[in-house]
């Protein structure tokens, strides 16, 4: 039991070591790692297409009428009329094609696409996506996709009906499978100012970002709120050149005190700003054991009785009464706090209950977020 507790508490001991190494004075990040330029983002594209060349693992035309309609429309555009024909192939599948168009993608550049089956196809392995137009939210075509689908999965079946599948064979990817045909129209060269949006909003961090930028380029940055910092490029620099210099400046990031708890997996993550006021804690373990055994009742010889199986249940309750109250808290660093919690000798799942009880008592100066 002690070895088990040692293994459970070891992650927090390692976490305490991290707290000793990572002091707030060293917690600096580049601006490009904590903020993004407003408007510089990817754009989602989507399209409907057909994957051909499947080895009998495609859609059933009887169960997927839209696959049949797509096949008829495609062949008709190519000069072949199969309407009314008794087509019963399973070598094709209707798919949804999606991709992300980068902010500054230019015509002729290539992007990756994802392909997902829409009907009852068993596998897209070995298939090829035919020409598919990819549209944006505005209905305009921004890219055209085509190519062989790579699934990274294996699926096989036997004549008796047994089958085995590894991975997801009905979804795949085509590396550099789409050619960009249209730009998004986002222009930065004509902009007089841009806005930086912090990924984790915080007033202190926003003010520090503005201060660091103004120290290097006076009068160019203003923190509007806890999320937005407005930048105005100096006259001697273009906007792109100014942003490239600003995003490499280092700033000390501040964050609110927060404890993240994953009750399903028994994971606890605490930020460096978490503090616990001085508090006394006692924790006891209650163990309930149920032992189910079967016994046989054998009648005496030449009697009229019958042999019977009788269940025999034994229930025992054990409670650890040896736990004494311990003083935890009053620490000035994360390592001190973790060492105090480790001194209780409890598992991470028990520590979750302890932290929630400390929060309820008002001694935990942090927000608890349960995943």
Image (cartoon, helix red, strand yellow):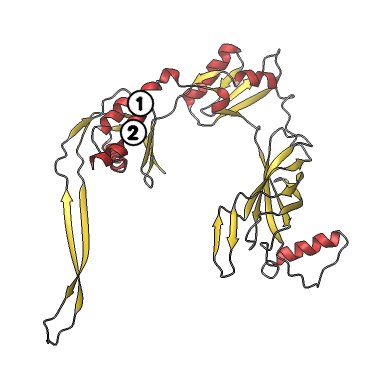
Please say if 121 is above or below 62: above
- Can residue 38 be spotted in the picture? yes
Q: Does label 2 or label 1 sit earlier along the sequence?
A: 2
From the image, which quarter does the N terminus lie in? Answer: top left
Residue shown at 51%/19% (left/top)? 251
- In the image, taking residue 316 as reference, residue 43 lies left or right, namely right
Please say if 5 is above or below 327: below
**Where does the image place residue 93, in percent across and percent down from the top left?**
70, 59
Helix, strand or loop at mark 1? helix
Q: For marks 2 and 1, give the CA distance.
A: 9 Å
Residues 300 and 250: in front is 300
**Where does the image place residue 181, in percent across and percent down from the top left?**
79, 40
Disc 2 + disc 1, Cβ < 8 Å: no
Residues 67 and 219: in front is 67
**Where does the image place residue 10, in percent across and percent down from the top left?**
32, 34
Residue shown at 57%/20% (left/top)? 222
Residue shown at 33%/23% (left/top)? 333
- In the image, taking residue 289 as reference, residue 66 lies left or right, namely right
Q: Which residue is mark 2?
A: 12
The label shown at residue 17 is: 1
Residue shown at 62%/52% (left/top)? 171
The image quarter containing residue 361 is: top left
From the image, which quarter does the C terminus lie in? Answer: top left
The furthest residue to the front: 301
Please say if 276 is above or below 121: above
Q: Residues within 10 Å of mark 1 (few under 14, many from 20)?
A: some
């Amino acid at each position: 039991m002690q070895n088990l507790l040692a293994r459970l508490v070891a992650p927090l001991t390692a976490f305490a070591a991290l707290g000793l190494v990572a002091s707030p004075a060293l917690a600096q990040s580049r601006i490009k790692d904590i903020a993004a330029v407003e408007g510089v983002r990817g754009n989602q594209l989507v399209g409907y297409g057909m994957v051909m060349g499947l080895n009998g693992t495609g859609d059933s035309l009887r169960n997927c009428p839209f696959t049949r309609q797509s096949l008829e429309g495609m062949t008709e555009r190519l000069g072949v009329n199969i309407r009314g024909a008794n087509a019963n192939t399973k070598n094709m599948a209707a798919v949804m094609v999606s991709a992300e168009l980068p902010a500054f993608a230019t015509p002729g550049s290539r992007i990756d696409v994802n392909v997902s089956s829409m009907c009852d196809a068993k596998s897209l392995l070995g298939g090829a996506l035919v020409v598919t137009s990819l549209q944006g939210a505005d209905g305009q075509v921004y890219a055209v996709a085509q190519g062989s689908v790579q699934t990274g999965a294996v699926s096989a079946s036997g004549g008796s009906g047994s089958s085995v599948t590894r991975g997801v064979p009905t979804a795949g990817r085509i590396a550099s499978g789409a050619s960009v045909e249209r730009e998004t129209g986002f222009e930065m060269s004509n902009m007089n100012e841009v806005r930086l949006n912090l990924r984790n909003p915080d007033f202190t961090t926003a003010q520090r970002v503005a201060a660091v930028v103004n120290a290097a380029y006076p009068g160019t940055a203003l923190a509007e709120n806890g999320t937005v910092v407005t930048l105005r490029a100096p006259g001697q620099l273009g906007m792109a050149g100014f942003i490239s210099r600003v995003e490499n400046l280092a700033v000390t990031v501040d964050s609110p005190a927060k404890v993240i708890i994953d009750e399903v997996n028994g994971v606890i993550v605490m930020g460096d700003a978490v503090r616990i006021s001085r508090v006394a804690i006692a924790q006891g373990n209650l163990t309930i054991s149920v032992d189910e055994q079967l016994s046989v009742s054998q009648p005496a010889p030449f009697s009229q009785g019958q042999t019977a199986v009788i269940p025999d249940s034994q229930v025992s309750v054990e409670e650890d009464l040896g736990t004494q109250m311990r003083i935890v808290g009053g620490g000035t660093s994360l390592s001190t706090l973790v060492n105090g919690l480790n001194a209780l000798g409890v598992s991470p799942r028990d520590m979750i209950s302890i932290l929630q009880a400390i929060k309820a008592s008002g001694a935990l100066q942090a927000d608890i977020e349960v995943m």
